Amino acid sequence: MKKFILILCIIFFGVSSANVAQAFEPDYRQIYLDMEVPTFSYVHGIDPMQYYDYKNTTYAPYPLFRLSSTLYFKSVKVVPGYYELSPTTHKGTDYVLFKENGLVRYIIPAYKKEIVPEGFYESHIPQPKLLVSQKLYKNFVNFVGKHIKSAQRKPTPGSYLEVNDLDNNFVQIVIYYGPFRYYLIFRTIQL
């Protein structure tokens, strides 16, 4: 009798935990329908903050995204290509700029912005193994940067990308950049 009650409890809690997990799953279709296509643009496709983002870094600080199939965000059709994904805020709303050759091609709103968990970049981005000569060069550059003010460069913010295939032809892109992660949602077919 005890075994029967134990099995019944396990089945009950297993079914209820599956329902709870399903209840916390966001409704991506509703999120997609609630978001609006941005009505603003940049003059000649130039992001005015781009100069300040690049000023103190050696190379582009934003993640590079290679898209091999077309994605749709309502009336915006993002064609295949190489894009630099640059998070920005406009009038209190978070957006991600899809830049191609330094010019803004698409502006997509982020439906959610969260803080990146501590230690995420260290655990998800592999560190290259350096040769002895590379280590010596790195130490020399760090020494020069530490003692000569004009040679100092800020470390490039961490960046990472996740692409998740969701139900009903939805795709979620999560962009990790610096202390925040930005969530975007697209469709693989046009409505």
Image (spheres, rainbow, N blue to C red):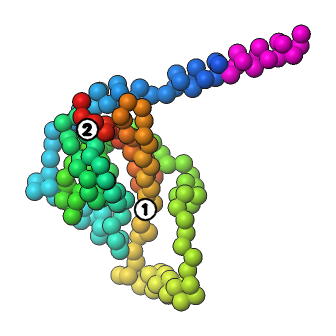
Residue 66 pos. (x, y %): 33, 57
Kind of residue indicated by mark 2: Phe
Callout 2 touching callout 1 (CB < 8 Å): no
The residue at which mark 2 appears reads as 73
Q: Quick check: 166 left or right of 108? A: right
Task: Specify the quadrant of the image occupied by residue 131.
Answer: bottom right
Mark 1 surroundings within 10 Å by alpha-carbon count, few (fewer than 14), some (14 through 19), many (20 or more): some
Local SS, label 2: strand
Q: Can residue 111 be seen in this snapshot?
A: no
The furthest residue to the left: 44
Total labels: the figure holds 2
The magenta segment is: 1-14
Q: Which residue is drawn at 26% across and 38% down?
A: 73
Residue 13 location (% of width, % of height) = 70, 19
154 relative to 177, above or below = below
Q: Which of marks 2 and 1 is nearer the N terminus?
A: 2
Crowdedness near tag 2: few (<14), some (14–19) or many (≥20) residues, C-alpha within 10 Å? many
Mark 1 element type: loop
Residue found at the far top of this picture: 1
Q: For residue 3: magenta?
A: yes
The image quarter in which residue 113 lies: top left
Q: For the stretch drawn in magenta, what is the main secondary structure? A: helix
The residue at 50%/83% (across/down) is 138
Q: Name the residue under label 1.
A: 157
